[in-house]
Amino acid sequence: MELGSFQTLVVEQDGPSLVVTINRPEALNALAAAVVRDLAALLDAVEPRLGPAVGWPVRGVIITGAGDRAFVAGADIVEMVELSAEQGEEYSRAMQAVTLRLEALPVPVIAAVDGFALGGGCELAMACDWIYASAASRFGQPEVKLGLVPGFGGSVRLTRRVGIALARELICTGRMLKAAEAHRTGLVNQVLEDGDATLAAAKQTITEIAATSPTAVASAKALINEVATLDVAAGLDREAVAFHAAFETEDKVEGVRAFVAKDQPTFPGR
């Protein structure tokens, strides 16, 4: 998939995986304004290339960081020194928009974390559908140590991932979680030996996803995001609507045919 070139990102397709590497190792991959702009531009290029009209050229996106010290160490504090309050809010809203677009992609997005994922880095990882991390990784929202609060979604997504009590503790203390503890809290799905193993695990998962129905995965992701804030009755109603829509897809016809015939399905992605 040809997506153009970016100042702060390296983007490569590996089979069904699109690997996006934030490439500022000299700054621990901090989310400078240029990175936010590049992520938005990447999404501009990726969004029209995912779906039935183009045949699902990739089945998942992996976001990682260059080097073995940090996934993303946070927002770019050096840049923030000169920002006015209005510019700070603009920076916050620009990155929040990126996180919402990642959540809305019709394919899973996996964060492959190796090293620090702090502040904006933790928030970027949490905007992904799930997180794989190396044993050396560290997670946290240390904004209060700078006289700030989370600005890229930490107060919302951390609460939903680990519960309100632990989120309050982590945000109000700025304490870091080691990878094993992050796994125990549900923040991280898997802990792997090192960065190479973490990236390999993410690619393997997307390879598994590539054997399933693209339309069903897209619908399931959207459904899970939608029902997360609904009560049980409203969520079940939305699930029934999505179940109805799945019955109208060619992928459902092929999946059921293959199951009955004890055959491997070839999903058309429609």
Image (cartoon, rainbow, N blue to C red):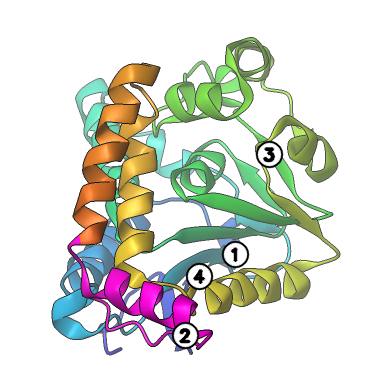
- Per the model, the C-alpha gap separating discs 2 and 3 is 47 Å
Q: Which mark is residue 139?
A: 3
Q: Which residue is mark 1?
A: 26
Q: Depth-wise, is mark 2 or mark 3 nearer the camera?
A: 2
**Marks 3/4: CA distance?**
19 Å
Which label is found at residue 261?
A: 2
Which of these two is toward me, 67 or 17? 17
User: Residue 197 vs residue 125: left or right?
Assistant: right
In this rendering, is residue 233 above or below 239? above
Residue 138: image x %, image y %?
74, 43
Q: Helix, strand or loop at disc 1?
A: helix
Closer mark to the observer between disc 4 and disc 1:
4
Image height check: is 17 above or below 183? below
Horizontal and vertical percent position of residue 18 = 43, 77
Q: CA distance from mark 3 to mark 1?
A: 20 Å
* Camera-nearest label, 3 or 4: 3
Label 3: state its secondary structure: strand
Q: Quadrant of the N terminus?
A: bottom left
Q: Which residues are magenta?
A: 248-270
Spatial distance from mark 2 to mark 1, Cα to Cα?
A: 55 Å
Relative placement, left or right, of 20 versus 208 is: left
Identified by mark 4, the residue type is: Asn
Give the image quarter of residue 239.
top left
